[in-house]
Amino acid sequence: MLHVLQAAELLCSSSQWLVDSHTFQTLSQERQDTLYAAEGLFYEPSTYRSLTSQEGKVLAKFALQLYDAGVFVEPDRSTDGFDFLPYSMLTYLADIVPGSLDGLYAQLLTRNLNFQSNSIFREADPETRDHIITLLQTGEPCPYHPTALLSALAWIGDRRVQEQFSQWQYHPEYEQWRQRVTLTPASFAHQAGWELTPDGGRRDLYFHTCYDLPRRTSEEGLRVNLGSLQEEHCGWCGRQLFSCFDCFLSDLPHVSEELFHQRGERLRLPLCLNCFSTQSFRENRVIMDVDFHGKAQWSTSNGARPQHVQVYEPDDIRYIAGLQPQQCFLGPQRRTPYDVNGTHIGGCPNWPQYSDYPICPSCERSMMFVGQWEEVPIYLWEGYLYAFLCLECGLSTIGQQH
């Protein structure tokens, strides 16, 4: 198997064959397969998890070489899938390998590397941050659209950005970028997992500790069950609830303090398979009352069932009979909270669409992200389930995206 740096060097040395599908097809099948295998390494998060920051820097320079050689997204040009490679490599490095982009931010800003959430600028130096702010204030031409620049600032998210976002949020009328952007600075902060506080500060919407949740093979470690049936029922449709996450915190008490900053015995975060699947995007959340001692029940704060939330019968194709329970345990701690792929607890969510932090109906603040479940065992259903919690109010809800 190719080492990751050897694979990157191979792709760079073959870049003239990657910029166009017609040119690529002139290669032998063996050569094509070798390049595809090398490319495939860089779309796997596991490739990056063992890299040192120094190896990450070398890999980042290879990514820029690929981009400069013409391996980038261009309308009406087919490149057999290689065109997204530099963007993905840099994004994974930014999210998983701290320090890997140090010294490169000025170069990143001169190339149109706009991709997904623009988290590649998260650790940018103050000079790059200030340059981005100046670009937005002056409207000076640059490779990035103002939305991409605002996303980059949101990921940087330091005190200077907080102050600037607060100013733009409440006094936007004089800014150049407002003519080309419909979203507010608060929306971009949400994309990066935080929100502005009334005093212009920052409140994170995720826990900075993140753990894998692999399948359990022994009785050791903190048990986390996914999809287990509960005794409690939904107040809208009457069906039994399922636990999206059932965390036995008493197994490892220090983890509860580390993750949630309080001790607890058990945290269950339930959902109703009928009603959660019919909720509108950002509306009609199914709210549950929970605590850190196992309480998990339908909340009276939900009120009466909305008219559009239907109750499906077993003979309806939309009826979800149940979940296949999965017994997991708290696996290795991830190096950063931004390693968002796969099923995990803590850290940041992976949004295929848009950031969607629900609002607590009691305190009216955004709920904290607790964890995500990927590859949920529901027939013909693809996507993620997300668990959210308001620590202060003891309320939770489950979100979904495909």
Image (cartoon, helix red, strand yellow):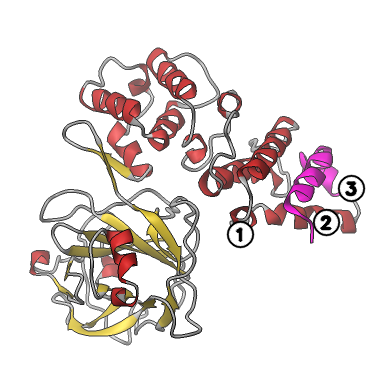
Kind of element beneath mark 2: helix
Q: Residue at x 20, y 70 (%)?
A: 292
Residue beneath disc 3: 26
Task: Residue 75: tell me if it is visible.
Answer: yes
Residue beneath disc 1: 46
Mark 2 burial class by Cα count in 10 Å: few <14, some 14-19, many 20+: some
Specify the segment rendered in magenta: 1-26
First of labels 2, 1 by sequence position: 2
In front: 145, or 371?
371
Residue 189 x, y percent position in the rendering:
33, 38
Q: Residue at x 60, y 29 (%)?
A: 104
Where's the C terminus, which quadrant? bottom left
Residue 19 is one of the magenta-drawn residues: yes
First of labels 3, 1 by sequence position: 3
In front: 109, or 335?
335
Residue 224 x, y percent position in the rendering:
37, 76
Q: Main structural element of the magenta stretch: helix, strand or loop?
A: helix
Residue 88 x, y percent position in the rendering:
60, 46
Distance of label 3 from label 1 (alpha carbons) = 32 Å
Three-letter amino acid code of the residue under disc 3: Thr
